Image: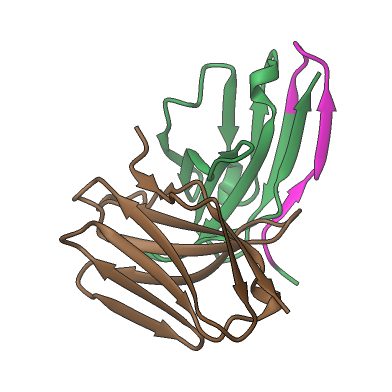
Chain colours: A green, B brown
Amino acid sequence: DTGVSQDPRHKITKRGQNVTFRCDPISEHNRLYWYRQTLGQGPEFLTYFQNEAQLEKSRLLSDRFSAERPKGSFSTLEIQRTEQGDSAMYLCASSVGQGPYGYTFGSGTRLTVV
Amino acid sequence: DQQVKQNSPSLSVQEGRISILNCDYTNSMFDYFLWYKKYPAEGPTFLISISSIKDKNEDGRFTVFLNKSAKHLSLHIVPSQPGDSAVYFCAASAPSGTYKYIFGTGTRLKVLA
């Protein structure tokens, strides 16, 4: 199966620690998205890459958050000095082409900040 | 400001009957709409989409209807099956090069055998 892969699936960290998540998109997909989902809410857009270029960031993405996609392949999302409010499911999605088509989501990384 | 609203948090339907999930939006600039299905511990799975130039799109048991004047869309599942039990999200996007989506809060569908 060559779907979107996210690692780790679960992460528990202490407040104030840094965490990094990884996303491996479908290989031919040039678009990559990060979303965040909290309990009882739908996914919320965080950031978007086209190939290696980060083209849009949500205001939800504070300066403690940074995302990269070196060489337009996998992507990482780092959260520095984690806070309890960062506890959420972090979802990565990828798509291909120029149209507004549905993404393929990964299974997500569930972050718990204690 | 919730631009995409799913006002029914849950819905129960008998197997074989029709399931109707509703979604309302406020932004008249939205021009593309999607429905996603989500099982526990999995990411959302794309189900069906519709462009604002259409008012209906069908794919097997799933049909999405769009009423632009009412800013309302609905997903019909006929006939409903127990495997359809999941959380359903509608999502909308406005014209941009990003194709980012605004998601509703979801409706949990339970299909009773």
Q: Quadrant of residue B88?
A: bottom right
* Rendered position, B85 above or below B15: above
- Between B3 and A102, the one lying in front of the other is B3
**x%, y% of residue B32?**
31, 62
Name the residue rendered at 73%, 31% in the picture: A20
Name the residue rendered at 43%, 32% in the picture: A57
* Rendered position, B85 above or below B99: below
| Viewer can see residue B57 | yes
Name the residue rendered at 61%, 36% in the picture: A38
Residue A77 lies left or right of residue A15; in this view the side is: left
- Between A45 and B15, the one lying in front of the other is B15
**x%, y% of residue A106?**
67, 55
Q: Quadrant of residue A84?
A: top right
**x%, y% of residue B49?**
40, 70
**x%, y% of residue B77?**
50, 78
Quadrant housing the N terminus of chain B: top left
| Viewer can see residue A99 | no
Name the residue rendered at 32%, 73% in the picture: B65
- Between A10 and B35, the one lying in front of the other is B35
* Rendered position, B62 above or below B26: below
**Residue segment shown in magenta:** A3-19
Q: Is residue A18 magenta?
A: yes
Q: Is residue B79 magenta?
A: no
Looking at the image, how many numbered discs can be counted on the residues? 0
* Rendered position, A17 above or below B90: above
Quadrant housing the C terminus of chain B: bottom right
